Image: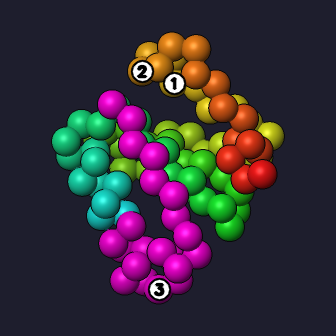
Amino acid sequence: DLVVEVHSPHDLDTKKRRSEALDKIRQYQAVRVAEVWVIKPDSQSVEIYHPEVAEPVKILDINSELEVEAIIPGLKIRVADLFT
């Protein structure tokens, strides 16, 4: 139901690696993972993807909070806490 992917700067430093990272997200979407969180330490942000939606449905910055009430009731994570 939930996949959390952490991208290092190395994962995105070439066009080929960026394409591979996006392909991995698309694979999760193809098998209907409800939410894919892509954590990007370099920009201190989190992109949230849903099945069949090419672009992130949300991009959260360091001042935001992650919630997945439908998947894990009560789970709330401050994005800032992911980078401390």
Whether 39 is among the magenta residues is: no
| Relative vertical location of residue 17 with respect to residue 44 in this rendering, above or below | below
What whole-number distance in Å separates the C-alpha atoms at marks 2 and 1? 5 Å
Where disc 1 sits, the SS reads loop
Which one is earlier in the sequence, the residue at label 3 or at label 2? Answer: 3
Numbered range of the magenta stretch: 1-21
Q: Nearer the viewer, mark 1 or mark 3?
A: 1
Q: How is the image coloured?
A: rainbow
83 to the left or right of 27: right
- Residue at the far left: name it: 31
User: For residue 26, what is the image quadrant?
Assistant: bottom left
Residue 64 vertical placement versus 18 (above, below): above
Q: Nearer the viewer, mark 3 or mark 2?
A: 2
- Please tell me how crowded label 1 is: few (under 14), some (14-19), or many (20+) other residues with Cα within 10 Å: some
Residue underneath mark 1: 68
Residue 69 in the image: state x and y as whole percent.
51, 17
The residue labelled by disc 3 is: 14
Left or right? Give the position of 15 relative to 9: left
Residue type for callout 2: Ile
Q: Residue at x 39, y 35 (%)?
A: 2
Q: Is residue 51 visible?
A: yes
Residue type at the position of mark 3: Thr
Q: Is 12 included in the stretch rendered in magenta?
A: yes
Report how far apart the C-alphas of labels 3 and 2 lie in the structure.
34 Å
* Circle number at residue 43: none
To which residue does mark 2 refer?
Answer: 71
- Residues at discs 2 and 1 in contact (Cβ within 8 Å): yes
Identity of the amino acid at label 1?
Answer: Val
Identify the residue at image location x=68%, y=67%. 42
Rendering coords of residue 43 (x, y %): 70, 62
Tell me the residue at 66%/52% (across/down): 45
Q: Secondary structure at mark 3?
A: loop
